[in-house]
Image (spheres, rainbow, N blue to C red):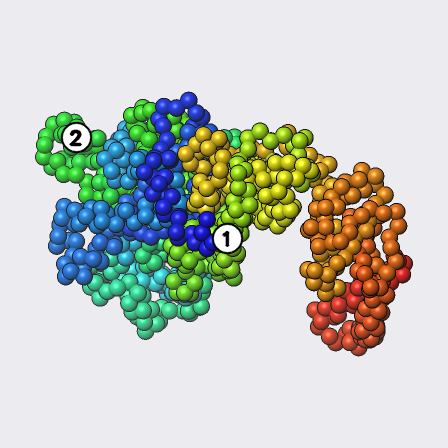
Amino acid sequence: MEKTFDPSAYEQKWQRWWSEREIFRAEADSAKPSYCIMIPPPNVTGRLHLGHALQSTIQDLLTRWRRMQGYNALWLPGTDHAGIATQVMVERQVEKEGTTRESLGREAFVKRIWEWKEKHQGNIRQQLDELGASCDWSRERFTLDDGMSRAVREAFVRLYEQGTIYRGEYLVNWSPGLDTAISDLEVEMREVAGKLYHVAYPLAEGDGRIVVATTRPETMLGDTAVAFHPQDERYQELAGKFALLPLVGRKLPFIADDVVQPEFGTGLVKVTPAHDLTDFEIGKRHDLPRVQVIDRLGRMTEEAGDEWVGMDRDAARARVVERLRDEGYLVKVEEYTHNVGHCQRSGVPIEPLVSTQWFCDVSDMAARALAGVDGVELELVPDTWRKTWEHWLGSIRPWCISRQLWWGHQIPAWYTAEGEVVVARDRQAAAAIAGTDELEQDPDVLDTWFSSGLWPFSTLGWPDETADLRTFYPTDVLVTGFDILFFWVARMVMTGIHFTGQLPFRTVHLTGLVRDAQGQKMSKTKGNTVDPLDLIHEYGADALRFTLAALDSPGRDIPLDIERMAGYRAFGNKIWNAVRFSLARTEGAAVAVDLDPSQLAAPERWILSRLARVEAEVNERFEAFRFDEACRALYGFFWGELCDWYIELAKPVLGVDDPGRPRAAEVLLTVIERSLRLLHPVMPFLSEELWQRLPGREAIHQESIALAPYPRGREAWLDDRVEADMASFMEIIGWARKRRAELGLGPRDPAEVTLVCSEPALAGFLAAQSPLARALATLGRWEVVAELPPAASRDRVVGVDVALSVAGRDLEAEERVRVESELGELAPQIERLVGLLANDDFIAKAPANVVGKNRLRLDELESRRRAMLAALHGGES
């Protein structure tokens, strides 16, 4: 084996090897139980970020683990067409060429996007390959491929025929930055430091006036009423009367409506049905006219008036406020912090506009999705998201599914010359229904999340009853970020139940956000973003994977500490060197499948028992989605028990014929082989590279570790007694090594350890380990005796009285001198702190944290003094 540990030398070699042999290909018809995970399809536009790396690591870990457990495991990959993001990206590209999408026309522009997609789609696979993803690439899907498009049309038509999808006029969230309607979920509420304008509206009759408050004075140009609460006694006399709209002169009726909050402002609100959802509903209840004064690009319309037409809405606000002030209508202006809806994609404030759109009434589907979680058929991990799930699905509104874009699934609806709408699966069917070929297809496309919502079953062949659908649906686990729980997860649950009668998955594991080491959110503006590929190239994919899995604790964000990743690269180096050493020292031995602990010595029985226990623990932790705890167990066993202890325990007998330690070399290789299999789901590259080098691995009868059985923990290997006895033995060895170092003894300086043990069984065990103890702690003598010798350094370890002696030195006297010296140093420190804390003036004036620190320091010093006195007086203090 090479001396230098270099992940870049073998990682992609194994990824190619796995791919060439189709190691990860699942079978549609198999006697094995099925296991399926669908990748949350990343945007075809992008590069994978650390959130993708985290989720991909967990998905791959689960898939590899189940595959090794004997499941017919499928991790299905694919990408999303990402309607808005992709269109915007290609629009910018054509603008750099001096043209626009409108100049190109729809057909040519969409062709350009397809060309761009074909050029860049492979980037996602390349990045996943570098991470070690065990996807079945023969089943790769794209949300705009032919099969997916057919599924989308089928779903749309069925929902339309059932009356769930309909076309209507409604107030929608309009993004002026993207020139399209967006759904409620695509609106991001941001806290904005704005102003609250109090404006006087004169009464139409007499000299009176009323005052209303608004954060958007530019929309008052579209006011068509003034409302108050029906039980607000202050304004009962206004019923049936009118106010005059400042700057415009329009008569506004006073109306009473329950939605008005009497405690807000003056209790009177202006009603602008064309630019506010609440006002829109008020307008419908009271049959108010709608005056749209802002258009889809955020500019003032002709209905706003000649003075304002064409003006940007922000400029119009400033001008309206100026006019109100000049004409005496502006009563006062207050600083006011409030939440403003912004387009999540463009960052531009949304404009509520009345528009004719396609909607999906998902209320019935939402009720069934709620029942799935309530009945525990669908498990959310962590369960803390259950209440949020219930709140959102319980208050869901119709979903605006149409988008004014060109890239995406064009809505399967056609219009006749007379304006009749025909919904069909294709143009030919539409023509047959309409009785004419003169049809124009709706230019809008569907919300990207509509097609993504069908992902778990459409990717398996739905609406056809395919072998893949029968075998792999419902899928088992969805791993995704909490931020798309409602964008995507809820919609998959709703459509899955609606179209297949089954939940699309049994468990949803929601990951936290990957943050920097200080817990700050990563962003380009902060300059703390990290490209996972850069981390792979520096530390290796296995180190990145282990870091992400080890930090994934349910319900918590992940602080990515680069030093910790460097530590896990060192872990890989430790494993590499351990295997390298073992192969060099076990020539002629091989991995064994027939080990009988009863025929083995204590160290071998101990490591097999510890291995069996850790195997069971790792499986349990994987099952519970506690990847952090599983990684902790793997790390602790491999580094702490196998490398730091068992290899040291085995060294004295490797390469020699010791009848007292039969088959030690075989045990070492067997433990390494099973440990590599145990580690494989988290560190696939390193485990494959080392496993392939082990003599005797052929007995596993698999060409790759990825297909080898996952260790489950052999009960026959469990041995509580030997674990307890070896734990005592190792504690005493650790004590002896530490005392040698404290006494400044070199490796050739002789020392002796004697022990007094009141437990006969443990005493016999410790006595039998004399040859091993002498080798491990560089001792001339290790013996269980009736009484400890004088002039020795004494202690009590795990209930055993121990002493270390060095010829020609009175360690007891040396210890006494050292302790007395330290006690002399402690005395004035303790005296000073006692005096300080007895000073009432200090206690009264010093900050509480300073007083607390001094009290803690006094407790520490007094505790040290008691321990030293106990050692000095043989346990008395």
Question: What is the residue that sits farthest to the front in this orientation?
Answer: 657
648 versus 434 height, above or below: below
Which marked residue is nearer to the observer: mark 2 or mark 1?
1
Residue depicted at x 22% and y 46%:
118
What x and y, as percent, mark residue 526? 42, 65
Residue depicted at x 75% and y 64%:
743
Q: Amino acid at mark 2?
A: Ala
Q: Is residue 426 visible?
A: yes
Residue position marked by numbered label 1 in the rendering: 573
Q: Gap between marks 2 and 1, in whole Å?
A: 65 Å
819 versus 426 height, above or below: below
What x and y, as percent, mark residue 472? 39, 29
Q: Nearer the viewer, residue 665 or 150?
A: 665
Q: Quadrant of residue 665?
A: top right
Label 1: few (<14), some (14–19) or many (≥20) C-alpha neighbours in 10 Å: some
Q: Nearer the viewer, residue 252 or 519?
A: 519
Q: Amino acid at mark 1?
A: Asn
What x and y, as percent, mark residue 643? 59, 48
Residue 430 disc label? 2
Q: Are marks 2 and 1 in contact (CB under 8 Å)?
A: no
Label 2: few (<14), some (14–19) or many (≥20) C-alpha neighbours in 10 Å: many
Q: For numbered disc 1, what is the local secondary structure?
A: helix
